[in-house]
Amino acid sequence: MAQEIAIGKRLKISKAQQNTLLAVLVASIILGIGIVLSIWVIKYISFNMKVINAKDVAISEYSAVIKTTGTCPAPAARNGVYSDAELDKCDPNNTEVGADTLRYKILVEMAKNDNLESVARESVAACYDDNGNKMKYDYIYSQYEKSDSDDERDYWLSTLSICSALRVIPDALPSTENVEALLASLNQLFILSGWEPESLAPGKNNNISSALLIDGLKNIPVSLSLKTDSRTTIGVLNKIEQSIREFAISTATVKWNSETTLELNADATAYYIDTLSLDEQVKEVKASSNGSKK
């Protein structure tokens, strides 16, 4: 009888141990799943924070560009970020030219720069009123500000770019490779120096010195050939030197053909600005620093 009682107790203890082990196993599984889920949730939250921060940086940079260019009025928010409502209401054609913006520097500071205006062209017919008087910058700019329609604003803005000191910038550094215009400019320099060339042709000097290569600029080869007296030759070189457009002479040969005739042959380089564009950057946000996950 006592033996049966002892066996029964042992069976109960064994079953209790099994239940305990089973409970520990279940608890361990639940704990493991909880830890894994916790790690996944933490990584998920961290990744989304990285995405949100990257978006905030992009929005802030876009806002800075809009504000700096003067496309829209400065944002009301202290953080300098435009709201959706401000962007919806923004109309660049009707936005006032605010100080410390790119538009102000171009339309006001550069357009009325006395040093640039001193070399501006005077022969553009659109810059004169019906009485034959050249329109001043202040008058053109006031008409631009008072314009009621987009067409009118475009007209006066075009007039401003042609008839103010801004005209000098494309004259000095064109935006296209216009060889005919370059030769016409060179011909005008020859005529102003008192020498009329028999013919003009594009240059063939393809081996441009590395010292004449500048980032953002494209090159146009120019060949100069003069055969005249020394005074006229020096006059031509002086006019080229005084030209608002750069002619960088790379090689030149000079020889006397007679006691009064000097022959000059030179290779030079003229420039025009490379096409500019706004490139959007794509930034990848990765959940793992080793790049295994995105």
Image (spheres, rainbow, N blue to C red):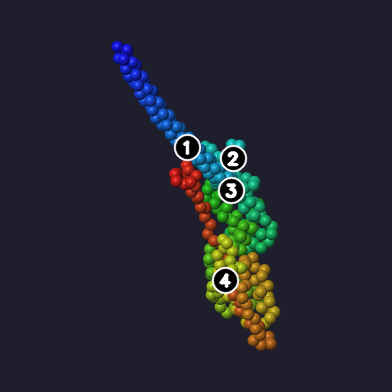
Residue positioned 63% across, 80% down in the render: 253
How far apart are the alpha carbons under marks 4 and 2?
47 Å
Residue positioned 70% across, 79% down in the render: 231
Q: Amino acid at mark 4?
A: Ile
- The residue that disc 3 covers is 69
Describe residue 274's horizontal placement relative to residue 113 as left or right: left
Task: Say whether disc 2 or disc 3 marks the residue closer to the N-terminus.
Answer: 3
- The residue that disc 1 covers is 43
Judge by depth and name the residue closer to the eye, 12 or 62.
12
Contact check, label 2 and label 3, Cβ < 8 Å: no
How far apart are the alpha carbons under marks 1 and 3?
39 Å
- The residue that disc 2 covers is 80
Task: Say whether disc 4 or disc 3 marks the residue closer to the N-terminus.
Answer: 3
**How many neighbours does mark 1 have within 10 angstroms: few (below 14), some (14-19), or many (20 or more)?**
some
Asked whether residue 126 is in view, the answer is yes
| Residue 268, x across and y down, in percent | 60, 72
Secondary structure beneath dot 1 equals helix
- The residue that disc 4 covers is 208
Secondary structure beneath dot 3 equals helix
Q: Residue furthest bottom?
A: 258
Q: Is residue 225 above or below residue 73?
A: below
Which quadrant of the figure contains the C terminus? Answer: top left
Q: Nearer the viewer, mark 4 or mark 1?
A: 1
Secondary structure beneath dot 2 equals loop
Which quadrant of the figure contains the N terminus? Answer: top left
How far apart are the alpha carbons under marks 4 and 1?
56 Å
